[in-house]
Amino acid sequence: MNETPAAGRAPADTTAPFLLLGDQGERPFDALALERELQTMWKSPPGANAFYRAALANLIVPLDAEDFERLADVIADVARRHPARLFRIGPARRAPAEPKRLTARATALCHLREGGGAFVCSEQVLLEYTEETAPLVPSAVRSLLIGDLPVVVLLLTPGPRPPWAEALAGLADIVVADSCVEEEPSAMAAVWERTGRKGAPMHDLAWARLEPWRASLAGLFDAPEAAPALHALHDVTIVHGGAAPPSSAWLLAGWLASRLRWKVDSRDGARFRFRSPEGGAPEIAFTREETDPDARIREVRARAAGAHPLDARITHEARAEEARLELLAPQARVAPIPFARRELAAAVVGEIQRRIPNAAFRDAARAARALLEA
């Protein structure tokens, strides 16, 4: 990572968490002019405040009109946590002066360094396209990539995506998507099947945000009273909000099935029957909580019978820092358990920094696809 003092105009309010430097005027796309503009911003520190350029990656973020502004703070927080040359791409908000050319502007997105005293800045290139100029986006981005840094494409809006957006994904070393924004099961499966340019597995933010549920269930079966029941499970119920099971619910079911080596056998609506290596016929069911409009997991209930009985329920309220464990068998108790929720920006950065294949996610996604196809 290189840090270079910045030129440009010092903002009036240097206490703001995020600041924009540079010329914010829009103009027809010109790669050489934009590169010169980016370089000019870093010639010397402006006034008493030091501004430093930092970049760990090329970060490409295509957004639709609705999400371009809605996700601006999330993208800024990602840049704060993981500085990058950031490409924010969206549809043109007004008719361009030159209809056959993309519209572009270069700025720097800055935040106050921890401990104060200086600002750390990510270069930001904003590209706007029309229906006519959209096919030019991949080549425009390619012309401005920092060659020795990894290319990350962040897909935060639902598909299907146009060919130019797919071409951007083809440039990437890492593709990070969010299957939670998809409503159709086939679209969720398409996210899980994606690969980056070098064949690296897809990074799914739904999986990253599922970590507290996986940790809670793993912790349940680490307890001495519940551990013997793990391979005797016969019924798991996943309660969710929203109109249909979200991708996180499918992935959680897939994770359980893959860890326990269950193979899907049949489906009856939202209930799935499996074949277990132990010879049983365990089931996983999705149940909708009609009073909750948010597409999220609310509760997981696990039951086992026979020599090692178990009846346990883990419930989590939206935005709570703890979940509630209610154990009905083999002995009754109620206890709070930590539930470390991950904000979207933190989940994005965690996936960007993951450079090795994620076998647990791969197996869970494969099992989830099998459920969708049953």
Image: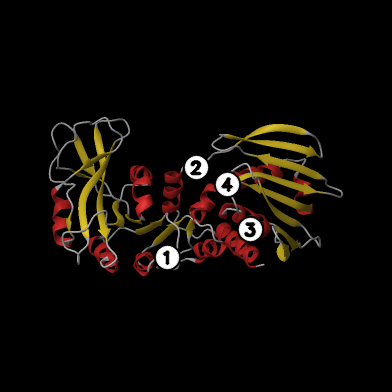
Front residue of 90/360: it is 90
Tell which circle, 3 or 2, labels the residue nearer the N-terminal end. Answer: 3
- Rendered location of residue 170, percent (x, y): 37, 68
Label 2 neighbour load within 10 Å: few <14, some 14-19, many 20+: some
Point out the residue furthest to the right here.
Answer: 307
Q: Sequence-wise, which precedes: disc 3 or disc 4?
A: 3
Residue position for label 3: 254
**Dot 1 crowding, Cα within 10 Å, few <14, some 14–19, many 20+:** many
Q: Quadrant of residue 76?
A: top left
Residue 296's disc is 4
Gap in angstroms between the C-alphas marked 3 and 2: 21 Å
Task: Label 4, secondary structure: give it.
Answer: loop
How far apart marks 3 and 4 lie (CA) works out to 16 Å
Q: Is residue 145 left or right of residue 239?
A: left
- SS label for mark 2: loop
Residue 368 coordinates in the image, percent (x, y): 61, 61
User: In this rendering, which labeled residue sits more in front, label 3 or label 1?
Assistant: 3
Residue for badge 1: 196
Q: Which numbered mark, 4 or 1, is in the foreground of this view?
A: 4
Element type where label 3 sits in the image: helix
Residue at disc 1, secondary structure? loop
Which circle, 4 or 2, is nearer the viewer? Answer: 4
Crowd rating for badge 3 (residues with CA inside 10 Å; few <14, some 14–19, many 20+):
many
Q: Quadrant of the C terminus?
A: bottom right
List x then y, in percent, for residue 197: 40, 68
Where is residue 314? Give x, y as percent.
68, 40
